[in-house]
Structure formats: C-alpha cells, structure tokens
C-alpha cells in the first residue's frame, strides 16, 4: 500500500484519515512506512490540520513528535497551529507543551 495514496473523491490520505480518528499508532506505522507528514489532502489540510479540527490530542502529539510542521497552511490559508489555538478551551497539557516547544511565534 502506498502510504501517500490520495483518494480521488474525498482527497483523503491514509495519514489524514488516521489523524481524523486520533489513531496515533496508525500515524506512526504510516510514517515508518514512508508517509510524508506534511502531505496534503485535497482540501489542503495536513494530518495535523485534521487532528486539530477533531481535537485529536494523541494524534497532534504524535505528529509533533515525528516532526510535522505547525506552520503548513490549508487551502484557506490557515496554519495548523492556529486551528489548534482556536480550540484552546479543549487544549490538554500535553498539547500545550508540544505547541510551545514546537513553535517560537504563534502569530501569523
């Protein structure tokens, strides 16, 4: 299976689907199998975008650990880190630690 396959209809990739369902183990397996962390779905969203929209704390943490970029922008021009910040009321301590450690400046 190509870990960077993109479905023609939905535009989803295996990595974005794993992020949407907050499956950190699958994210790691796909990454180890050659999936590009910042590969975009049809809507321009990366796995990190998908995880932040869904509140997938385990997936957000795993993508950060693997080196995913919080600065990648989706087709609307929104950086994943801003999508995450919009949900600050849901932010878990682990997510906060990785967001701060990974980004020097959260302004865009």
Image (spheres, helix red, strand yellow):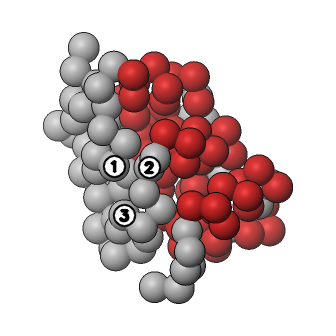
The x, y position of residue 98, in whole percent, is 66, 55
Q: Is residue 26 left or right of residue 100?
A: left
Q: Which mark is residue 68?
A: 2
* Residue at numbered disc 1: 38
Task: Classify 18 as above or below 48.
Answer: above
Residue 45: where, in percent of width, then height? Answer: 36, 56
Q: Are marks 3 and 2 in contact (CB under 8 Å)?
A: yes
Q: Which residue is mark 3?
A: 72
| Closer-to-camera residue (27/20) | 27
The x, y position of residue 86, in whole percent, is: 64, 73
Q: Circles 2 and 1: CB distance less than 8 Å?
A: yes
Spatial CA distance of label 2 from label 1 is 6 Å
Real-space Cα separation, disc 1 to disc 3, in angstroms: 7 Å
On screen, residue 13 above or below 107: above
Residues packed near mark 2 inside 10 Å, few (<14), some (14 to 19) or many (20 plus): many
Checking the image for residue 66, the label placed there is none
Tell me the crowding category of disc 1: few under 14, some 14 to 19, or many 20 or more residues within 10 angstroms, Cα based. Answer: many
The first of marks 2 and 1 along the sequence is 1
Residue at x 63%, y 44% (from the top left corner): 61
């Amino acid at each position: 299976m190509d870990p960077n396959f993109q479905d023609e209809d939905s535009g989803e990739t295996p990595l974005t689907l794993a992020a949407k369902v907050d499956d950190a183990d699958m994210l790691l397996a796909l990454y180890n199998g050659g999936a590009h962390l910042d590969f975009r779905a049809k809507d321009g969203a990366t796995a990190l975008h998908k995880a932040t929209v869904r509140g997938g704390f385990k997936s957000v943490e795993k993508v950060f650990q693997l080196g995913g970029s919080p600065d990648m922008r989706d087709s609307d021009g929104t950086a994943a880190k801003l999508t995450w910040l919009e949900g600050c009321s849901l932010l878990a301590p682990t997510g906060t630690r990785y967001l701060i450690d990974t980004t020097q400046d959260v302004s865009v």
